[in-house]
């Protein structure tokens, strides 16, 4: 399953760090962050609970960029 989320991030470098952090979260099969569009596209592992996984993604992203936001979780 794939979902798209609106994000708030300050710079392209931070967006890349968020993408790398999200890819390491259990339940995430793949993730891309588009800084220009302020979007995060997440592909979840088979059977993963997207809401629970996205909470983990948000906390992983906050470790790299504490003022980032992911909307629609």
Image (spheres, rainbow, N blue to C red):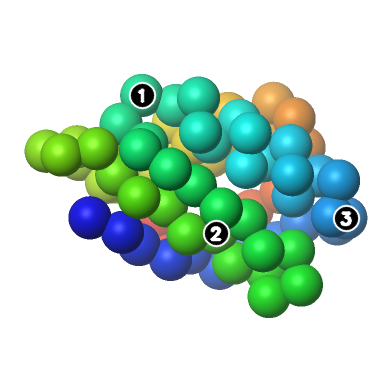
Which residue in the structure is indicated by mark 2? Answer: 40
Q: Which residue is mark 1?
A: 26
Residue at (55%, 59%) from the top-left corner? 40
In the rendered view, tell whether residue 33 sits above or below residue 53. Answer: below
- Would residue 25 appear left or right of 2 to someone viewing this image? right
Q: Nearer the viewer, residue 43 or 9?
A: 43
- The residue wearing badge 3 is 11
Q: Residues within 10 Å of mark 3 (few under 14, many from 20)?
A: few
The residue furthest bottom is: 37
Which of marks 2 and 1 precedes in the sequence? 1
Task: Find the distance from the CA under tag 1 to the CA under tag 3.
Answer: 25 Å
Under tag 2, what secondary structure? strand
State the SS at label 1. loop
Question: Could one spot residue 66 in this view of the protein?
Answer: no
Q: Is residue 68 above or below residue 65?
A: below
Q: Earlier in the sequence, mark 1 or mark 3?
A: 3
> Residue at horizontal 15%, vertical 39%?
46
In the rendering, at what x and y percent does residue 48 appear? 19, 37
- Disc 2 crowd rating (10 Å Cα; few below 14, some 14-19, many 20+) is many
- Secondary structure, mark 3, is loop
């Amino acid at each position: 399953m794939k979902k798209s989320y609106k994000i708030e991030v300050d710079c392209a470098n931070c967006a890349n760090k968020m993408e790398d952090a999200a890819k390491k979260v259990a339940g995430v099969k793949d993730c891309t962050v588009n800084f220009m569009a302020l979007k995060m596209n997440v592909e979840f592992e088979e059977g993963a609970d997207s809401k629970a996984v996205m909470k983990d993604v948000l906390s992983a992203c906050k470790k790299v960029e504490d003022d980032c936001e992911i909307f629609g979780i």
